[in-house]
């Protein structure tokens, strides 16, 4: 089983739609969780950290379910500029420095 | 401030040749990471350094791969000899202690 699993997509949604991505992780001892965004042929960039209580940043909401070991990202009112690949990231067992990246979920927002 | 700088941005070489990728981390960051990204395997951590010291190289695929960090502002990833299956995008990232990892623009390597 992969340490971090994501649905690769693509998710094709119209502008204004709400879309949600889920991610599961295998290491129950993981402590740090993030969503990164990667545009085509660009480097990954941090979108947001994921906290146990859930957190929101504008149109983006991230939630963590430790019992089920999954992380979610909700995007409301999708924009064309949201088209990208979203990477789910968790830290590795025993180390807060090493991150494990999922292979990403591709989102395509169309007009 | 400049972000993470990587060179070259593109490299095309022939099988058997030596390849050296370079990275300059963000000033003041004490962690440096080397990743490889392919369509099949996604983003994989190869090795990371803390204060110029290699901490974990368990992701380095083979002895053909080596990495050094002679000082706080420079690191290299070397592949010798290169093989077609090494073709990928190689990213360098840096961070401060427990901080966000900032990635460089990557080096797109093609081994013919």
Image: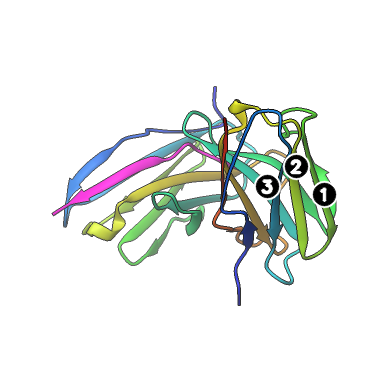
Q: Is residue B62 magenta?
A: no
State the residue at coordinates (71%, 28%). Answer: B16
- Residue B36 visible at all: yes
Q: Which residues are magenta?
A: A98-111
Which of B91 and A92 lies nearest the eye of the viewer? B91
| Dot in front, 1 or 2 | 2
The quarter of the displayed image where residue B7 is located: bottom right
Q: Which residue is mark 2?
A: B78
Q: Is residue B102 left or right of residue B49?
A: left
Residues at marks 1 and 2 on the same chain: yes
Q: Mark 1 touching mark 2, by CB under 8 A? A: yes
Say which quadrant the N terminus of chain A sits in. top right
Q: Chain of mark 2?
A: B
Residue at the top extreme?
Answer: A1
Residues at marks 3 and 1 on the same chain: yes
| Dot in front, 3 or 1 | 1
């Amino acid at each position: 089983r992969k340490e971090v699993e994501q649905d690769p997509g693509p998710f094709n949604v119209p502008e204004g739609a709400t879309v949600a991505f889920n991610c599961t992780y295998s290491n129950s001892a993981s402590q740090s969780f993030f969503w990164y965004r990667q545009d085509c042929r660009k480097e990954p960039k941090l979108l947001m950290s994921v906290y146990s209580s859930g957190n929101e940043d504008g149109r983006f909401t991230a939630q963590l379910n430790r019992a089920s070991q999954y992380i979610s990202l909700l995007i409301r009112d999708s924009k064309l500029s949201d088209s990208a690949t979203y990477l789910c990231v968790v830290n590795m067992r025993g180390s807060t420095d090493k991150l494990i990246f999922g292979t990403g979920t591709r989102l395509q927002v169309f007009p | 401030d400049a972000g993470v700088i990587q060179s070259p941005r593109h490299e095309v070489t022939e099988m058997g040749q030596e390849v050296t990728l370079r990275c300059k981390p963000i000033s003041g960051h004490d962690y440096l990471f080397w990743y490889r990204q392919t369509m099949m395997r996604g983003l994989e951590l190869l090795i990371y350094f803390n204060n110029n010291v290699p901490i974990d190289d368990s992701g380095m695929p083979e002895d053909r791969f080596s990495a050094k960090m002679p000082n706080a502002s420079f690191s290299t990833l070397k592949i010798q000899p290169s093989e077609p299956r090494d073709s990928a995008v190689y990213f360098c990232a840096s961070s401060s202690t427990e901080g966000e990892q900032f990635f460089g623009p990557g080096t797109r390597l093609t081994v013919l």
